Amino acid sequence: MTSALRTRAVHAGRDDLADLGLHAAPLDFSTTYPARDSAEEARRIDEFAAGGNVTGIYGRIGNPTVERFEQALAELEGFDHAVAFASGMAAVSACLLSAVSQGKRHIVGVRPLYGCTDHLLTTGLLGTEVTWTAPEDVAEALRPDTGLVFVETPANPTLSELDIATLTEACGDVPVLVDNTFATPVLQRPGRLGARMVLHSATKFLGGHGDVMGGIVACDAEEAARLRSLRFATGGVLHPLAGYLLLRGLSTLPLRVKAASETAAVLASRLASHPSVSVVHYPKLGGPLVAFEVTGDPHAVIGAVRLITPAVSLGSVDTLIQHPASLTHRIVAEDDRTGSGITHGLLRLSAGLEDVEDLWLDLDQALKSC
């Protein structure tokens, strides 16, 4: 039975609970699972090594609570599989290592990306080589050893957008990975547009309350097997409590994103006519994020907010504001930052669930300080 996303967000990963006589998803903290039949355990380990999704041996191989979250996010993004990690960057690292393990160390990237992702690609710490290019030039940058095209849309922090369907068509057999953290499956599902991998910093909107860290990649069975193997080898596992909280967060994801998006649209409109604001960036797709450039000192704005939380990250129930050039993208070389639109005056705001009038009063008085 096909249901609306809002319905599936509530029930995905929980469809069997009534038959189990449960209402809340069970939380399994076990790090190891006893078994008297060690020959059967050996068979199951071989099954995992061959690409199977196995739980009930050791926590680094798999955990049933985390698996529920993986099943739910895969369903919401329109994939058969998803693999969860301890953080968004652990998920990014696994995707890059997967390409390297297949002998495809060349990555094509489109800026801007999240600052730490940019840094990881630029430095080649994981054995990759990156070619940075514009969206329309991606096809020309592809090589026989290209393992991945890495994009983020709407992008962090400028909220620039690209046409995923056109990009994936131009890339042919080369897999496209879309960081969908900002949009979430509520606003777009890149898999429907040809993306082979969809990544989330689950710390953000999927968790939704600023109290849990995680990352997840939705993909096909073959890629999921590689990612699980890499997760087991490198140890970037998601803690069961984090998996529980992220599964719970998914149930309210559509409501939170819709409400925050409505607030962000109002703020974007008002910021566009504010005398202290020179440019407003707001995606055609909509969403809870607004970026804007101030005419004065951006640090003065950060220091003057009282209701809005001055902090990195996004996607929480409270509204967050930060200065990308100083924080999330400080690790990116200055020329690369400015070349991708991350100016000194740019501020990024993630709308929360407060009343929009209260937020505007705080933002307006803070802008007057710059």
Image: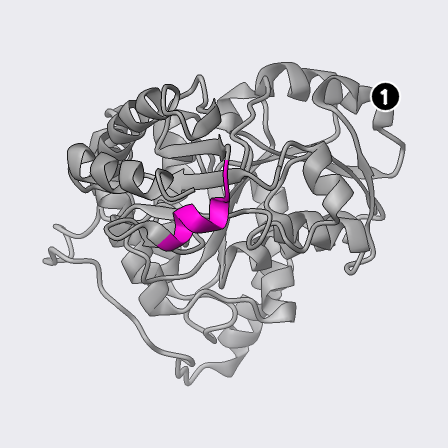
At 36% across and 19% down in the image, what residue appears?
273
Residue closest to the far right: 144
Q: Is residue 63 above or below residue 57?
A: above
Q: Would residue 107 be found to the left or right of residue 54 on screen?
A: right
Amino acid bearing label 1: Glu
Displayed quadrant of residue 232: bottom right
| Location of mark 1 (residue) | 140
Residues packed near mark 1 inside 10 Å, few (<14), some (14 to 19) or many (20 plus): few
At 20% across and 32% down in the image, what residue appears?
7
The picture places residue 328, in percent across and down from the top left corner, at: 56, 52
Query: For the residue labelled by badge 1, is the local secondary structure a helix, a strand or a loop?
Result: helix
255 and 100: which one is in front? 255
The picture places residue 121, in percent across and down from the top left corner, at: 75, 49
At 80% across and 55% down in the image, what residue appears?
123
Q: Quadrant of the N terminus?
A: top left
Residue 209 visible within the image: yes
Q: Main secondary structure of the magenta part?
A: helix
Q: Would residue 310 be found to the left or right of residue 1 on screen?
A: right
Whether 299 is among the magenta residues is yes
The picture places residue 37, in percent across and down from the top left corner, at: 45, 81
154 and 37: which one is in front? 154
Whether 281 is among the magenta residues is no
Q: Is residue 206 above or below residue 97?
A: above
Q: Quadrant of the C terminus?
A: top left
Q: Which stretch is magenta?
A: 296-303
99 and 324: which one is in front? 324
